[in-house]
């Protein structure tokens, strides 16, 4: 049986009286993408900072490729790449100079430093700006360079903390493709993201953190199945009517819709039967939805059910 690339067991981190992580457990198989999701303050970045040896845990254990992050931090650092939420490149150097510097700091062979920099500049569409100071870059360009810097030593394990924040759709799509290529070549990726579409498309497995605890850990498909295959959305016109309609639906079929202003939302394994029951209940109460939308459930729906928030409120 293949050992996990990342193993976390009972991981706990306290900052004074604040518990950022509370006995967190998960494993990441090698050569896969693992998505770590959760609202602001859930503990995602704290977990990554422990796994990358920046923070020491209060309790519990974390390993990367069999190396304990506390007992053997130097060994862990040689095996990982990290792109955090904020660009770590030097704004006074050019992109090319930054990448060559990272090559030197990570002890890459001298003959490979400039070719590796050129390769990454091309891959991240930074060739035209390669010899400009980074301080002249846009936020999206800096983000691309920061991720390129994390890839300089070809790490077998890559940590990406909200990697596509600030990127335009084209750049985001290009990065998704790059992540797929890295994983196909054997790289293990742990990412946090505010875009659940990103986790849905990339991650083999997803863990949802809420208040420092794992509240779900499974494949995106299984999490969506657990919630229900179909989501019904009813726009009732105004919030008062929606509240009335929610009470009618609950009284008739024993299900309380999720309310978001004037919008009511229900998930079920069999949406057609549920929709018929809901419409009959509303018709009897002389309530008519302004619009009806029936769709497949998404990871966003799962996230809301587990954390009480939609991704729009997640950093």
Image (cartoon, helix red, strand yellow):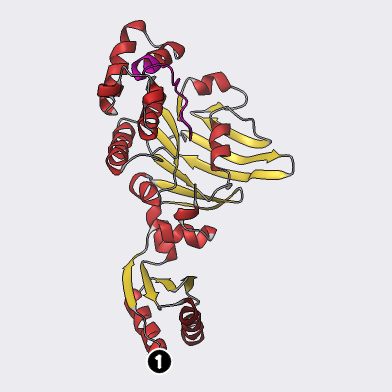
Tell how many labels.
1
Q: Residues within 10 Å of mark 1 (few under 14, many from 20)?
A: few
Left or right of 40 in this view: 237: left
- Give the residues in magenta: 83-99
**Snapshot quadrant of residue 34:** top left
> Which residue is found at the position 49% from the left and 54% from the top?
313
Decide which of 228, 234 is in the foreground and name it: 234
- Residue 217 screen position, x and y as percent: 49, 51
> Which residue is found at the position 41% from the left and 93% from the top?
284
Q: Is residue 200 magenta?
A: no
**Snapshot quadrant of residue 72:** top right
> Which residue is found at the position 61% from the left and 47% from the top?
212
Q: Main secondary structure of the magenta part?
A: loop
User: In the rendered image, is residue 149 in sight?
Assistant: no
- Residue 263 screen position, x and y as percent: 42, 72
Left or right of 276 in this view: 85: right
- Against 218, is 77 above or below? above
The residue singled out by tag 1 in the image is: 286
Q: Is residue 98 magenta?
A: yes
User: In the rendered image, is residue 265 in sight?
Assistant: yes
């Amino acid at each position: 049986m293949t050992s996990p690339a990342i193993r976390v067991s009972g991981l706990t981190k306290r900052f004074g009286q604040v518990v950022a992580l509370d006995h967190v457990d998960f494993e990441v198989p090698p050569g896969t993408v693992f998505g770590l999701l959760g609202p602001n303050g859930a503990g995602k970045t704290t977990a990554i900072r422990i796994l990358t040896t920046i923070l020491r845990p209060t309790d519990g254990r974390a390993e990367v490729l069999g190396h304990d992050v506390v007992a053997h931090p130097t060994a862990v650092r040689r095996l990982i790449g990290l792109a955090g939420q904020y660009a770590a490149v030097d704004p006074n150097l050019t992109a090319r100079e930054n990448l060559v510097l990272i090559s030197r700091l990570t002890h890459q062979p001298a003959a490979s430093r400039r070719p590796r920099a050129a390769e990454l500049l091309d891959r991240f569409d930074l060739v035209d700006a390669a010899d400009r100071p980074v301080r002249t870059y846009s936020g999206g360009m800096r983000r691309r360079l920061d991720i390129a810097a994390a890839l300089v030593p070809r790490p077998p394990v890559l940590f990406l903390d909200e990697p596509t924040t600030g990127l335009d759709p084209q750049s985001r799509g290009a990065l998704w493709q790059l992540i797929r290529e890295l994983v196909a070549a054997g790289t293990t990726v742990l990412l946090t993201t505010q875009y659940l579409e990103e986790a849905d498309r990339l991650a083999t497995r997803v863990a949802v953190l809420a208040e420092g605890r794992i509240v779900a850990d499974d494949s995106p498909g299984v999490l969506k199945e657990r919630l229900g295959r179909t989501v019904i959305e009813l726009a009732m016109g105004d919030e008062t009517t929606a509240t009335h309609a929610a009470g009618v639906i609950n009284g008739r079929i024993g299900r309380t819709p999720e309310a978001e202003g004037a919008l009511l939302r229900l998930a079920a394994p069999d949406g057609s039967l549920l929709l018929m029951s809901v419409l009959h209940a509303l018709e009897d109460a002389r309530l008519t939805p302004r619009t009806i939308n029936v769709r497949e459930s998404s990871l966003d729906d799962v996230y809301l059910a587990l954390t009480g928030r939609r991704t729009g409120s997640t950093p």
